[in-house]
Amino acid sequence: MARVQEGSREDLRRGVDFIGVCCVFWCHDGKGKVLLHKRSAACRDEQGAWDVGSGAMEFGEDFESAVRRELKEEYCVEPLEIKFLVADNVRRASDGKNTHWVALRFAVLVDSKKVKIGDPKGMDEIGWFTPDNLPSPLHSQFRRHYEFVKKA
């Protein structure tokens, strides 16, 4: 972890200055469709790409609580069922810096009629898609991560 020099303040960033932990949730309707959102121009990276929900864990939070909180914040809905799928490393370059996250992936059953945009600053639109009719462009990590979901 980066050190803070006496008399100065440095902001440490998850995933850049230390390994970040995030929960990634693949929301589904139980009938073969997955929920995706289009990332807005205000997002840190991959603006305009379609992605699944995710968010960093907060200190002291357990995995399912993080998924529930982020799901409520992003899609204004409570989960009907949460299923842990897999944990993996996500390493990539972002804004010229290497990042490192541990991603905990979940499949989350939700009521598709209750879902709405809860983060209009970060999302331009949302939609339900079947695996054979996905929108474009997809987030750069989508296909790799979708392989984990299909196996589960």
Image (cartoon, rainbow, N blue to C red):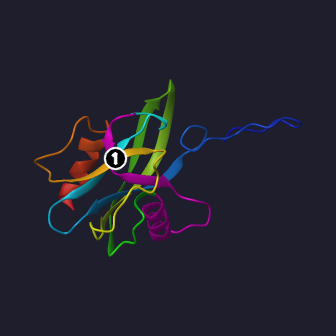
Q: In the rendered view, does 97 fall on the left or right side of 27?
A: right
Residue wearing tag 1 = 125
Mark 1: amino acid? Glu
Tell me where residue 83 appears, x and y as whole percent.
Answer: 32, 70
Residue 69 lies in the magenta-colored region: yes
Quadrant, the C terminus:
bottom left
Quadrant, the N terminus:
top right
**Residue that sits furthest to the left in the current view:** 132
**Residue that sits furthest to the top in the current view:** 96
Report the label total.
1
In depth, the one of 146 and 134 nearer the eye is 134
**Residue that sits furthest to the right in the current view:** 7
Q: In the rendered view, does 86 fall on the left or right side of 71?
A: left
Tell me where residue 39 appears, x and y as whole percent.
Answer: 38, 41
> Is the residue marked by circle 1 packed among few (<14), some (14-19), or many (20+) residues within 10 Å?
some
Tell me where residue 72 appears, x and y as whole percent.
Answer: 45, 65
Tell me where residue 106 appears, x and y as whole percent.
Answer: 34, 62
The magenta segment = 47-73
Residue at image x 27%, y 68%? 113
Residue at image x 45%, y 70%? 64
Residue at image x 24%, y 49%? 146
Residue 19 lies in the magenta-colored region: no
Q: Is residue 5 above or below residue 14?
A: above
Quadrant position of residue 71? bottom left
Q: Is residue 82 above or below residue 54?
A: below
Where disc 1 sits, the SS reads: strand
In depth, the one of 85 and 11 nearer the eye is 11
